[in-house]
Amino acid sequence: DSGVTQTPKHLITATGQRVTLRCSPRSGDLSVYWYQQSLDQGLQFLIQYYNGEERAKGNILERFSAQQFPDLHSELNLSSLELGDSALYFCASSVVGGVGNEQFFGPGTRLTVL
Amino acid sequence: DAKTTQPTSMDCAEGRAANLPCNHSTISGNEYVYWYRQIHSQGPQYIIHGLKNNETNEMASLIITEDRKSSTLILPHATLRDTAVYYCIAVKWGQGGKLIFGQGTELSVKP
């Protein structure tokens, strides 16, 4: 158990819909990362937040957005869903963020878009 | 960020050392070498990281060549539970620590 929790575990929805994935980091961790893992693209970095502020952005689509709240939990919002958005979405947290701070990954949310 | 190259798959006998190679010939002076692994579809797990010195922890050892163009992750006594995909990643100082995963090496530990 990494100490990072993600909800829900599984999500099945239809194309065109909007969903919200939630992540609670380990106690004391200020930095949260989101990653997407699909069969054809592998594990891809989406976005990072540090203490409520966006810190780095990767291959995140404009239809996707994220935020980190004052209590440090984070949400990833996916809208206008397409079949290709079906994937495992992982959240990770680290103490500060950056080299020297290992990332602890949650169990993931499996999103299926039908 | 430096590109890393790893073999697609490797086998190892249970109880023997597993040596996983990684090439990172374009690594820059401010890039660290990190290793993570992913067991089945679980979240990736941190193993070890280093800059230029060899490193050891309770999970593994990391050997980095003097020119830093390649490294080897060593699992000293592989068990069936070490069967996973192992990722070697170059992480640049000052960029927040985001991980850019490649294809990794699928390690199968066999009895």
Image (spheres, rainbow, N blue to C red):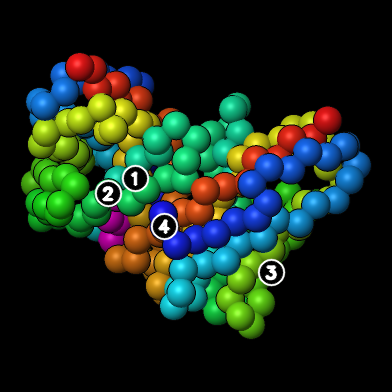
Same chain for labels 2 and 4? Say yes or no. no
Residue at 57% x, 47% y: name it.
Answer: A108
Tell me which amino acid carries mark 1: Tyr
Magenta segment, which residues? B30-34
2 and 1 marks in contact (CB < 8 Å): yes
The spot of residue B40 in percent (x, y) is 44, 32
The residue drawn where x is 28% and y is 61% is B30
On the image, numbered disc 3 is attached to which residue? A67
Residue B62 visible to an observer of this rendering = no
Instruction: Between residue A45 and residue A23, name the one nearer to us.
Output: A23
Looking at the picture, tell me which residue is in the foreground, B15 or A77: B15
Task: Assign a secondary structure to mark 4.
Answer: loop
Q: Tell which tag, 1 or 4, sits nearer the viewer.
A: 4
Vertical relation: A14 (above or below) B11: below
Q: Position of residue B51 (x, y in %)?
A: 20, 57
Circles 2 and 1 on the same chain: yes
Q: Amino acid at mark 3?
A: Gln
Name the mark on residue B22. Answer: none
Q: Which residue is mark 2?
A: B47
Name the N-terminal-most of marks 2 and 1: 1
Marks 1 and 3 sit apart, C-alpha to C-alpha, by: 26 Å
On the same chain: label 1 and label 4?
no
- Mark 1–mark 4 CB contact (< 8 Å): no
Q: Residue B89 placed where, x, y %?
A: 35, 45
Q: How many labels were placed on the picture? A: 4
Real-space Cα separation, disc 4 to disc 3, in angstroms? 21 Å
Q: Secondary structure at mark 2?
A: strand
The amino acid beneath tag 4 is: Ser
Q: What residue did someone put label 4 on?
A: A2
Give me the chain letter of mark 1.
B
Q: What residue did someone put label 1 on?
A: B36
